[in-house]
Image (tube, rainbow, N blue to C red):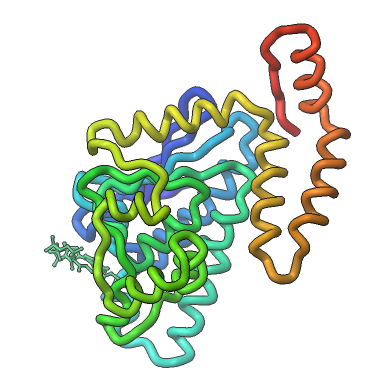
Amino acid sequence: MNYPLLLVTSENHIATIIINRPDKLNALNMDVIAQLGACMQQLESDADIRAIILTGSGEKAFVAGADISEFAHFNVEQGRTLAAKGQKTLFDVVENLRTPVIAAVNGFALGGGLELAMSCHIRVASDNARMGLPEVSLGVIPGYGGTQRLPLLIGRGRANELITTAQMLKAQPACDAGLVNYVVPQEGLLNKCKEIALKIAANSPTAVGYALQAVNAGFDSSQNGFNEEVELFGKAFGTADFKEGTTAFLEKRKPNFKGE
Ligand code: COA
């Protein structure tokens, strides 16, 4: 499949996706959203890929938001469809991917850009990163899950303040609030993400996928996370990775996981 707006590479079981619209600070237009959603699904079905790093091209922005020029003239129904389609084709896809996605936040992550980072499983920021949901300054609200995912990550009070003031958080306060896991100098950002990705890649890809599924179930009001954990825990016992992992431990050797 061809993704003209993305740069996709892979090495050592780790895929890296770079959103490549630097002249527009990697703003998410409909083409980027469609390509990114399809690319994520393709990488998930690739048995060789065990972790994905997502970042933006250039040194200024991860993603500076949804493409404002694309929706400035939209009516009520078009606005509704934009949010619904984006959530379904990209943001929910990323969050529910079996393969962990690490957002390398290398600059501005605003609006849809922060929403994209928040749909990823892990976030690492460079020290020049700025994060916020400025939608109310444009007369709209976050539409790609921002009102739901931000309170889960930083708490309702802090999320209410960030959303209603439309202010940006610098990298270190964002880290202190739990929005990102680490802050590193920009030149070390991808290496830090790779370090995390390599640790993930050493584990059972099947079990990693089940674990993410169980975590997500706890945040889905239609599911019981504890029951889902029990089911997936049991299901793991039927996998080749479980046999390999336990056998390797007993034989005092490193496991050689293959995934499903
Ligand atoms: N949608 C569409 N285009 C965008 C964009 C967005 N969300 N964010 C940036 N761009 C474009 C600018 O229009 C400009 O294009 P141009 O050179 O053709 O005029 C280009 O990217 C560079 O942006 P610019 O504003 O000149 O850079 P800056 O360094 O002065 O400011 C920001 C950087 C991020 C502060 C500023 O671009 C901004 O506020 N962007 C919008 C953020 C936002 O509200 N996002 C939420 C959308 S719902």
Q: Which residue is drawn at 36% across and 66% down?
A: 29
Can you say whether 127 is above or below 134 in the image? Answer: above
**In which quarter of the view is residue 260 placed?**
top right
Can you say whether 19 is above or below 45 in the image? Answer: below
Q: Residue at x 53, y 73 (%)?
A: 85
Rendered location of residue 135, percent (x, y): 32, 77
Rendered location of residue 102, percent (x, y): 46, 43
Residue 144 appears in view: no
Q: Which residue is drawn at 53% across and 68% down?
A: 87
Can you say whether 233 is above or below 25 in the image? Answer: above
Rendered location of residue 181, percent (x, y): 41, 44
Residue 246 appears in view: yes
Quadrant of picture, ligand 1: bottom left
Can you say whether 48 is above or below 160 in the image? Answer: above
Q: Residue at x 70, y 16 (%)?
A: 255
Q: Nearer the viewer, residue 57 or 225?
A: 225
251 to the left or right of 22: right
